[in-house]
Image (cartoon, rainbow, N blue to C red):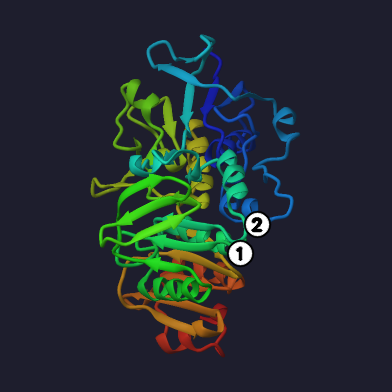
Amino acid sequence: MNEQIIAIIGGGQAGAMAAAALRQQGFSGPLHLFSDEAHLPYERPPLSKAMLLDDNPQLQLVLPTSWWQEHNVQLHLGVTLREIDRATRTLTLADGQTYRWTQLLLATGAAARPLPLLDALGERCFTLRHAGDAERLRAALQPGKSVVIVGAGTIGLELAASATQRGCRVTVVELASTVMGRNAPAPVRDYLLARHQLAGVRVLLNSAIEHAEAGEFISLTLQNGETLQADAVVYGIGIVANDALAREAGLETANGIIVDSTCATADPAIFAAGDVALTRQPDGSLRRIESWENANFQAQVAAAAMLGLPVPDATPGWFWTDQYSDNLQFVGEMQGENWLCRGEPGDRKAIWLQLREGALAGAVALNNGREVRVLRKLIQSGHVVSEDALCDESVPLKSL
């Protein structure tokens, strides 16, 4: 029988955690990880926060430096993959080196969706996906500088907060009629909009840039005719999945690699996890979850599936954002119109809650991190809970 050789392409959260999960779940054979970055796999969430704000920012590694050698994982850093050959089960690097594999995990992540109008501005235009991006951006965010951020999603708002905290004058331009429209419920969006405005950020909703040019300053002309002047512009308007290798190898893609609930592609020897993966739902729709927690979860799922072990059960989705001194944690289902509130958002400590058929379906905790574990358990239990008790701060959530 041929020796099992597992190759992981991608050195982000999903790739690194899949390597850890494979070793943890008993795989002792050859294990390779290929990354186009020269760094050891590092955490992405700090790029828009600590990496811009700390006096002496350090990359936070996903796994300790010594882990890779101790667990006999072959690291190939700073390399470019040219081709995956499914027939011969080999992969080829740009320099012509080839490696055999019996199973492959694609954790290639995603790139910032490009905005050619702004990219043409050159080095004063920024996106944020990698450590090098954060380093360049940090140098530009100097006190008194004027910064325009295009896109008011999670990354855009985190960048607005970080730039404001660094003393910049910040304007946010958003095409939609609200901030964080994709993943936050209405009362949380209202809270965040007010929070940024209070910090001095100018937020322009229902706004689009029609013309951009670079002179001494960057000039951005909006559709309504107003011109914004800026020293730097940063944009975050979504992602483009790094699925070219998979597509060229004949796998099914749609701005992402299509997988089933075990992270398997149409080729039973190839799996995908993290931001690049699109999971086919029971109703046939495709779903991508762009979060740190999902990258970790899919790494566990893919590792188990590759080894023929039972895959872990899904838990309620969870992600967080840190803006100014606020920490917001989102658990469970965020779609829906009717939200209750426990606590007083004006006091910067509250929990927004959503019920479905009497059971807790989703929650957003504002500066209430210690309650998140309880909220997850409540959502998972599916128990019917009392609205009055949920909203009454004198009733401990763990008693419900």
Identify which residue is drawn at 44% across, 45% down: 215
Front-most of residues 271 and 145: 145
Task: Residue 153: name its quadrant.
Answer: bottom left
Seen in the picture, residue 383 relative to 322 is either above or below; the reply is below
Of all residues shown, which one is farthest toward the left? Answer: 283
> Where in the figure is residue 6, as x and y percent of width and height?
54, 24
Q: In the image, what residue type sits under mark 2?
A: Leu
- Foreground residue among 216 and 11: 216
Q: Nearer the viewer, residue 230 or 23?
A: 230
Q: Residue at x 51, y 47 (%)?
A: 297
Q: Secondary structure at mark 2?
A: helix
Disc assigned to residue 53:
2
Q: What residue is disc 1 on? A: 165
Q: Position of residue 356 (x, y in %)?
A: 33, 73
386 lies left or right of 307 = left
Residue occupying the point 43% across, 89% down = 388
Report the residue at 61% width, 21% height from top: 30
Q: Is residue 162 above or below residue 275?
A: below
Q: How many marks?
A: 2
- Amino acid carrying label 1: it is Gln
Is there any visible trace of residue 262 in the rendered image?
A: no
Disc 1 and disc 2: Cα gap in Å? 8 Å
350 in relation to 308, above or below = below
Compared across the picture, whether 45 is left or right of 340 comes to: right
- Give above or below for 159 relative to 266: below
Q: Earlier in the sequence, mark 1 or mark 2?
A: 2
* Horizontal and vertical percent position of residue 22: 59, 34
CB contact under 8 Å: marks 1 and 2: yes
Q: Secondary structure at mark 1?
A: helix
